[in-house]
Amino acid sequence: MSIRRFILKGKESMIDHVKSVNEFGCIYWVTARNKNMNIGDICYLFLSGKDHNQIRYRLEVIDTNCMRDDKCCWHIPFVGNKPCYKLIPTAEMYQGNDLSREDLEAIGINRYVQYKELNDYQISFIDSYFQ
């Protein structure tokens, strides 16, 4: 099975993903029919809000059917009874300003995308910021 790479968009007004990484060493992402990720797949997390509006994390899927444990990171009412993916960072949080919506549009990623499998060119561009 080959490793696939995806982009995910996280709204910081809903969940503080940075706090989740800092406190738990991971983030959780609800499974859904339109998201088919496997253990070992890589996800780039675009954070919108809180002065982020960039891809900030490169994460690896380590579990595809777990329950979330991040209630303290939620800004909206907690929904913890749905199966989730568990993802861990594979690099430090990106602190720059070169993975914005505009930068991603320049490599063919729609600014409104919530979930998308990436092509080799997009992966190479994004990965160059996580060395």
Image (cartoon, rainbow, N blue to C red):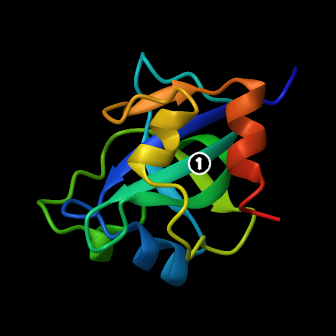
In the picture, residue 117 is in which quadrant? top right
Q: How many marks?
A: 1
Which residue: 17% across, 68% down? 75
Label 1: which residue? Answer: 44
**Residue at point 45%, 52% (across, down):** 46
Q: Residue 42: x percent and y percent?
A: 70, 42
The quarter of the image holding the C terminus is bottom right
Q: Is residue 81 above or below residue 93?
A: above
Nearer to us in this view, 16 or 128: 128
Position of the N terminus, as image quadrant, is: top right
Question: In this view of the protein, can residue 40 be seen by the observer?
Answer: no
State the residue lying farthest toward the left: 77
* Nearest the eye: 80 or 123: 123
Q: Nearer the viewer, residue 9 or 64?
A: 9
Residue 84: % across, % down: 47, 42
Amino acid type, callout 1: Tyr
Q: Quadrant of residue 130?
A: bottom right
Where's residue 93, x and y in %?
A: 60, 73
- Residue 54 image position (x, y, % from top left): 44, 59
Mark 1 surroundings: few (<14), some (14-19) or many (≥20) residues within 10 A: many
| Residue at x 36% of width, y 60% of height | 53
Residue 59 shows in the view = yes
In-image side of 72 versus 75 (left or right): right
| Mark 1 residue element | strand
The residue at the point 40 percent across, 28 percent down is 110
Image height of 36 relative to 121, above or below: above
Q: Residue furthest bottom?
A: 23
Q: Is residue 45 left or right of residue 102?
A: right
Q: Nearer the viewer, residue 58 or 39?
A: 58
Q: Is residue 34 left or right of residue 48?
A: right
Q: Residue furthest right?
A: 1
